């Protein structure tokens, strides 16, 4: 079976309880999500298993508590990237 590319977009604001899914899709839509992120210098984290799980969350919903730890690692990684860019 051919695996279609999937993508999910997270938004987290400092005082929010949990990150929110702002977009998700597969195939052509995933390609467009990734393309838009690249155009806007939004960090992209490739994690197939996490993406699979996030794509099952409805757009506009907070991530489930079971995914907090995995998403926290992603947020920490992106925060470190942001710190590196701000030093340049």
Image: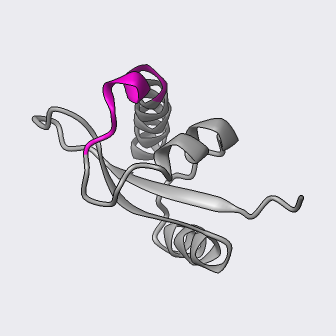
Residue at x 32% of width, y 25% of height: 65
The residue closer to the viewer here, 67 or 79, is 67
Describe residue 68's horizontal placement relative to residue 30 as left or right. Answer: left
Does residue 49 sit above or below 51 in this rendering? Answer: above
Q: Position of residue 71 (x, y in %)?
A: 43, 31
The residue closer to the viewer here, 5 or 11, is 5
Q: Position of residue 4 (x, y in %)?
A: 75, 64
The residue lying furthest to the left in this view is: 15
Q: Position of residue 13 (x, y in %)?
A: 19, 43
**Numbered label tally:** 0
Quadrant in which residue 26 is drawn: bottom right
The residue lying furthest to the right in this view is: 1
Residue at x 50% of width, y 53% of height: 55
Q: What coloring was used for the rendering?
A: one colour
Describe residue 21's horizontal placement relative to residue 49 as left or right. Answer: left
- For the N terminus, give its image quadrant: bottom right
Residue at x 57% of width, y 46% of height: 51
Describe residue 14's horizontal placement relative to residue 51 as left or right. Answer: left
Does residue 23 sit above or below 56 in this rendering? Answer: below
Does residue 19 sit above or below 60 in this rendering? Answer: above
Residue at x 57% of width, y 52% of height: 44
Q: Is residue 67 magenta?
A: yes
Q: Is residue 79 magenta?
A: no
Q: Which residues are magenta?
A: 62-70
Q: Position of residue 23 (x, y in %)?
A: 40, 64
Predominant secondary structure in magenta? helix
The residue closer to the viewer here, 38 or 55, is 55
């Amino acid at each position: 079976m051919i695996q279609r590319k999937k993508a999910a977009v997270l938004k987290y604001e400092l005082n929010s309880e949990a990150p929110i899914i702002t977009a998700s899709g597969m195939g052509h839509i995933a390609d467009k999500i990734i393309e838009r992120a690249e155009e806007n210098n939004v960090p992209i984290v490739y994690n197939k298993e996490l993406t699979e799980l996030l794509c099952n969350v409805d757009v506009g919903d907070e991530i489930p508590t079971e995914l907090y730890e995995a998403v926290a690692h992603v947020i920490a990684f992106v925060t470190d990237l942001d710190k590196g860019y701000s030093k340049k």
